[in-house]
Image: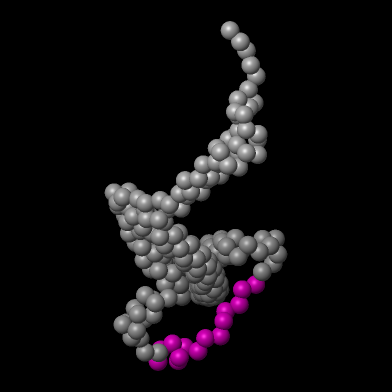
Amino acid sequence: FTSEAVDGFSGGISASLPVFNGFNRINTLKQSESALEQQYHIIARSKQDAIFNASVRYLQVLVNQELLEVAKANAAFQEELLQSIEVFLETGTRNIADLYNQEALAKNAALSVVEAENQLNISKAELVRILQIDPLADWKFEQPEIEQAQLLTATVNIETFYNEAIANRPDYKQQKKQIEIDQRGVKIAKSNYYPSLRLGYYFGSRFSSLADENFDEQFRNINRVQV
């Protein structure tokens, strides 16, 4: 038995390129592009939702302000009517039952004012929350100037509005992109059933101290492999 130390070295470089894989890469790229466009439509829809929600809350504040004014006017009227009945009661033209009934109506009107104030405060809090503004500030919401005559004389064409909605609604475009993404996914799945073709290249060499040739001769000439 003999023992001997052997030195060896090997190295190589390889590369491969898919020539055909059932259009998998093309469909994957198209699917990613559709997904990117879909995200843009989602962002646009989120912006529209934010504007819509803020507008609805703002209109609710304006409505509650008007309802509060109506409640206050009704409370003032009921209070004046109560005072008139008290005067009529002293003169004997009205009875005590009318006074009790009017007192109940006046108290209900005062309660309506409190409820209207609560609803107004709640709607303001909701609007402040949506707008993400300072909740501790004293905000005042004014009614915009809108001419009622323009609203009443405006013509409404349902078909025109429908076409504009289809052309501009991001959620509709988002769903269309989702259909494209799903269709690309089906094509990607089908690509696995097609045969694939790849172009490859390998270059390498090795050295062993058992051979009589030197390192340069073995590595560069004798043991060189190129496929």
Of residues 165 and 114, the one drawn nearer to the viewer in this rendering: 165
Image quarter of residue 221: top right
Of residues 26 and 5, the one drawn nearer to the viewer in this rendering: 5
- Image coordinates of residue 26 in percent, x first then y, are 40, 60
In the image, 12: left or right of 149? right
- What is the total number of numbered labels drawn onto the structure image? 0
Q: How is the image coloured?
A: one colour
- Image coordinates of residue 67 in percent, x first then y, are 51, 72
Residue at 32%, 52% (x, y): give it: 191
**Is 107 inside the magenta-drawn segment?**
no
**Is 150 inside the magenta-drawn segment?**
yes
Of residues 79 and 115, the one drawn nearer to the viewer in this rendering: 115
- The region drawn magenta spans 140-153
Residue at 44%, 87% (x, y): give it: 151
Residue at 45%, 63% (x, y): give it: 33
In the image, 35: left or right of 113? left
Residue 57 in sight in this render: no
Residue 199 in sight in this render: yes
Asked if residue 217 is positioned above or below residue 187 in the image, the reply reads above
- Image coordinates of residue 43 in percent, x first then y, are 51, 64
Residue farthest to the right, as pictured: 137
Residue farthest to the front, as pictured: 212
In the image, 156: left or right of 102? left
Residue at 42%, 72% (x, y): give it: 169
Quick one: quadrant of the N terminus?
Answer: top right
Of residues 18 and 9, the one drawn nearer to the viewer in this rendering: 9
Asked if residue 184 is positioned above or below residue 204 in the image, the reply reads below
Asked if residue 211 is positioned above or below residue 35 in the image, the reply reads above
